[in-house]
Amino acid sequence: MSCQYLLLLLSVGVSAVEIQRPRGVPLSKRQFYEEGKPFTCLDGSRTIPFDRVNDDYCDCQDGSDEPGTAACPNGSFHCTNAGFRPGFIPSSRINDGICDCCDTTDEYNSGSACQNTCREMGRKERESMQKMAEIAKEGFVLKQQLIQESKRGLEDKKAKHADIEVSKNELEKTVEALRTVKETAEQPEKEAKERHLKAWEDQKAVIRMEKDKVKMAEVFLELDDDADGFVSVAELLSHSELDSDSEDSFTEAEAQGLLGGVDKVDPVAFESVWYAIKEKYISEANVDIPAPVENPPEQIREPESDNDSELYPEDDIPEEEEEDDEEDEDDDTEDRDFKSPPPTQTQEKKDDDDEGTMPTYDQETQILIDAAQKARDAFEEAEKALREVDDQIKNLEKEISFDFGPHAEFAYLYSQCYELTTSEYVYRLCPFNRVSQKPKFGGSETNLGSWGHWAGPEDNIHSVMKYEHGTGCWQGPNRSTTIKLTCGKETVLVSTSEPSRCEYLMEFISPAICQEPPSLDSGLHEHVEL
């Protein structure tokens, strides 16, 4: 097939230029297709006569000899698309009856009634580009305002940081002074409290001694079975718990040893015996009387059913019976929840109660306590104020050093949050903090990631935000979110998706990402090839 040429009328205004080249060849490769000269395949694999270019037979492995036919499966066809954007389509779409190029050049021999829509498509694209350029221009103006506000804000923060540092130095001095006042006031308070406590302990010791004497007298009378005014070896033998070795029987020799080597002792001599036996002695009044054993009520056996079908399997209990069982369980729960009265106090606890409570502090001690407490309150209040100042300084230093963009244009997003409501969820983005998801109709919030880093390409790193280490997915990774920033006049979260499991993608519009737009006169003309 002889080489076919395109007559390309490329116009800007009313001008037209006729450029000849083989069909399907872009102007950028025109120099490789010179009529009358042998054609070398673009991959350099072979050279063929020029008349075999576009002859509907594939000679080159890369398909470069058939740019205007469907002969090569790996070939591509160039659509000039004057008035719109040029482009490429696979060679297999040439003359397939479907108009792929808006200038209809791909259907030159199919008989399809294609219409050239490039001018209309170009017009719509230019209108869309013009609107986008206008938005970018307005957004860029807003960005400049944000930059100026960020500069003023940064200066204010630095000034505030300096002021707070001065306040911190003063507070540190105040805290140390109040610490000295506190420690000075606490020393006499401590000594007064110790004196008061010692007096109370001494008083309790006297009370315990008196009680011990009373108890000793009671035990003496209890052991003096014949009421002769003496406790004898025979009377002591009735208390086998006093056996020192607890292995053999309690012997007379052992009992006599407890009595100091004599056969009997009077109340005065019994005092030394009492100190030796009081830890082991069991009063006869404390011996437990066994409670009568109650016979358990006889269990009434229900007659067994002769019909097995009348017995319900465990899983087939009727609803009414299940409800009854639940009520019984509730009753049992109530019974279990009912608290029985506390057990009777032990004798030791009773004895402690008999000693009474520690008396209130005397007026002199109370004055010292109040003074020390006042000093402590003042010190703690100053310490709290110092901690708050430290927190303020840390937060200011974080904001001052944070990467809010080349000119701090993203600083206005700090401490702000933006929401997007879908049919199922409410998504919440708090820039430089976290991203979350919450069911629209109630439920717990899920963390989709905490602030990680800027993740855009090297030449525009501040165009993408990355949030990481969110709530873990079931048997999967921790959730993470990528925020793609788009230029706009408003600041709004506009879309969200989950392209991969547990990995979310959101689009966030902000004027801070807007770049200075080119002139409306450049880039909005009709696309032409020269």
Image (cartoon, rainbow, N blue to C red):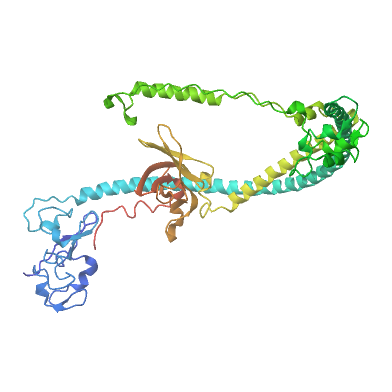
Along the line of sight, the residue nearer the viewer: 193 or 222: 222
Image coordinates of residue 141 in percent, x first then y, are 46, 46
Along the line of sight, the residue nearer the viewer: 222 or 46: 222
> Residue 30 vs residue 162: left or right?
left
Which residue is painted at 32% across and 55% down in the image? Answer: 523
Residue 212 position (above or below residue 250):
above
Confirm whether residue 197 shows in the render.
no
Quadrant, the C terminus = bottom left
Q: Quadrant of residue 295?
A: top right
Image coordinates of residue 405 in percent, x first then y, are 51, 53
Which residue is painted at 40% across and 52% down in the image? Answer: 517
Q: Quadrant of residue 246?
A: top right
Confirm whether residue 380 shows in the render.
yes
Image coordinates of residue 424 in percent, x first then y, are 36, 36
Along the line of sight, the residue nearer the viewer: 181 or 474: 474
> Residue 230 vs residue 486: left or right?
right
